[in-house]
Amino acid sequence: MSAHTPDDPITAEIRGLQRPMAGRRLLSWVLFLVGIVGFLVAPVLASLHGGDEAAVARLPVIGPMLADAVAESHARLEARRPDPQTTPDYAKGDAAGFYQLADLAGYKAAAPTLMALDRWWNPGPVAVAHQPWANDCRVCHSGAFAQVKDSDCLSCHKAISDHVDRKTVHDARLDVRCATCHLDHQGGFALAEQNKHAVGRDCADCHGDIKKSYAKTETGNVRDFADEHPNFRVQLNDSAPATQAMRVALKRVRLPEGKAQLSEPTNLKFPHDVHLDTKGIGSPDGKVVMKCANCHEPDPDGINFKSVTMKDHCQSCHALKLEPRLSNREVPHGSVSDALDTIAEFYSYVGSTGNVPRGPEPLTKTVVIKRPGEPEQAPRSFVSTPGNNLSRATWSATEMFEKTSCVICHEVKRLAGPGKEGSPGRNLPQWSVAPIAADHAWMPKSSFSHASHASAKCESCHDANKSSKASDVLMPGIDGCRDCHAGSKPVADKIVSECSLCHGFHLPTAKPVPAPVKPLQRLATGPVRQ
Amino acid sequence: MSQESILSLGGFRYLKWSLILAIGSIVAYVLDDPRTAPNGGTWLGYTLGIIGALLIVWLILFGMRKRAYRSNLGTVRGWLSAHIWLGLSLLVVATLHTGFQFGVNVHTLAYTLMVLVIVSGIWGVTVYMRNPSLMSGLVAGKSLQQHGDLLKEFDAESRNLAKSLGEEVQRLVEASATGRVVNGLFGRFGGPGRCPTDIAVAALHEMGLQGDKAIRDLYAVQVRRQSQLQRMRGFLRLKAWTDVWLMIHVPISIGLLAVLTAHIVSVLFYYNGNVLYDGQALIYQRG
């Protein structure tokens, strides 16, 4: 108890128990140093130093000790890196012009920080396309204490375009950084996708009074989809093509209000209403009830449809039979002279050999149209008609072009002969078939996913079953969209719809990298030969 | 105002401040509508982050104010009350600063350490509010050394009584007298185990049944020693649990200071927000 006598064990123990617990200071220092070195000093040094393994090995004393660990760490990081070259997503992005795949190879081992020590600074998952470089901060962050520069983005995204051509419109409001809209580290989705809900906010800054930015524009003012968005403009053929090879000019026409209907020259005869008759339509297999999807097959992208072609979608009913006796002999589709040659060759063969080829199955009904006053009869054949080869071929060709086949869908005109020099069909009557306009995107400035709307019936937007002419423009106007889509402000039972739901920001790229969303195709002949 | 606890100080003055800060942050968070998902890099994110960082530094400064006995900058009681309430509001401020984005990185590490510090602080407040009165009940106004002196008196008396008894009894008494008050480093936190006094009491109880008065007297002394020990151990156990939270609270808060520094420097090192930009981008944030 007194200071100068030695403590007995109990006093000593109690004195010890009353001292504050030891080690607080030591523990504090340890945690502080681990935190500051591990998460600040080491990453900063590594970042400034780069990923040079050899330089580490040359360090005095600690160099040889670290060399193996550094090499091993780098190998491990490299093994975990997704390879952009083998990821389908990258090819897709490349096709859309988001970047050029060939350039990515050079970035494979871009600028890793030593042992990627700075990866612990990564505040959140980077967009899916950036994940091969998720541990290489300096690929995008090229300078310390500096923002990501546009040049950092553009070193891969070489093909990306501006919003408008700067030569056309000069507006200081467009002088923004890539990162003004595209902020990464917000999750693994595509940057364009995750920014969608935010991008629309600023559109009205310019598009609310677009003439102020660009007086000559034909774009209407837009503030919000709900009530301040003009009706859609659809892209239409300016005229029907005069020749097969001609690509007609396209124009954009605003859909009229009310019941008025737009029409577009196509040179095609196609009544949607007849084909979509709910009571069915005649076919070689009897009456069938057709559905839109019989001809309009969706593309895998869910946005567009495959081109409708004679071969895949028409010919099973609209066969081009030249001789009633033969159910399996047709003329080729697409070229008048090829068709006439085939007819001439066929009847010439019949006439010169006396052989009449037979089809695999007997015909059950007449193909040739019955003339008034003629009795109904069994299938007729031009083979058995009086006259020579030429007269039989002429009859067959006239039947096909003017009565049974071509004229059903096409504008057909009899021409003065003779035909092409040296061709078998030269001496037959000649016809011209007006070329069909190529199909084209209807609303090229927006993107509409049919797949997302698959639960709705086609006719709830497209009045095809009331359309009797191919020239009818069956594109729906904005009112139908507004039944389900609100603007940027939430409305009960409606979908909040910012501009970016349908519209992109960047112009289609000027470089020839991306294929067009859908290649232009002639209805009959397939891809246009340039 | 002796009835005022550390929590209710000044009519809950700091609780009010804390609520204003927390509710203000929540309201701002709800009203804010940033371009991206809420995160630390938006305007509000930076604001909450700066408030949070300043709060952390100020909360850590309490450790210095506590030791600055000459300081006239408020009372230590006032500082502690503010430390507790504002420390609790930090939980709200910092959580909203994160925008609920967590990951395996230095940023979430800083948040985790902060939560550990705050949770240990809540534990600290609990033991400080509860244990001292229990402890003073146990020691009944005497110091622990005075309680130790009682043990020594029991031991002297026991040795005296044991003189006339056999060697086995003397060994029991000696073991009881030299046994430690608490056993080992973690003994003070309480725990199972029989100490030599427990053994002596049990053995003397057996012997006392045979009717020897000296044994029964010795048994009575050892029972009193045992209850005295239990009283002291109860006190020490409460004291240990009261003290140990600081072993967590303080070192982790110092670790937090380091990781927080790394967090702040790193987000500025690879900076990409639009907030500190030259202002150009900000024009477009709202129409």
Image (cartoon, rainbow, N blue to C red):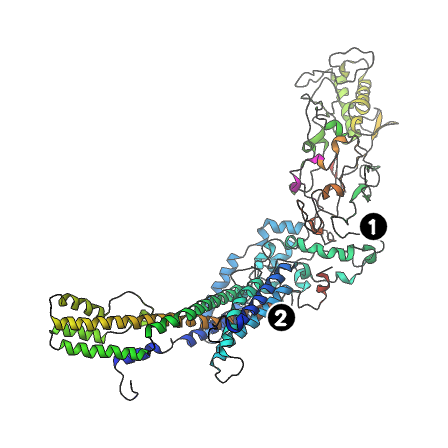
Q: Which mark is residue A145?
A: 2
Residue A411: x and y in percent read: 83, 30
Could you tell whether B208 is left or right of B30 in the image?
Answer: left
Residue A324: x and y in percent read: 74, 18
A471 and A321: which is toward the camera: A471
Secondary structure under the numbered disc 1 in the rendered image: loop
Q: Quadrant of residue A392?
A: top right
Q: Which mark is residue A218?
A: 1
Query: Callout 1, which amino acid?
Result: Glu
Magenta highlight: main SS: loop
Residue at 71% across, 19% down: A326
Query: Callout 2, which amino acid?
Result: Phe
- Quadrant into which the N terminus of chain A falls: bottom left
Residue A32: x and y in percent read: 48, 73
**Chain to which mark 1 belongs:** A
Question: Eyeballing the image, is A302 above or below A347?
Answer: below
Could you tell whether B79 is left or right of A250 in the image?
Answer: left
Residue at 64% across, 49% down: A92
A477 and B233: which is toward the camera: B233
Residue at 77% across, 49% down: A229
Question: Eyeballing the image, is A279 above or below A257?
Answer: above
Q: Quadrant of residue B190?
A: bottom left
User: Which residues fall within the magenta stretch?
Assistant: A447-459
Q: Please report whichever mark, 2 or 1, sits nearer to the chain's N-terminal start.
A: 2
Residue at 83% across, 26% down: A426
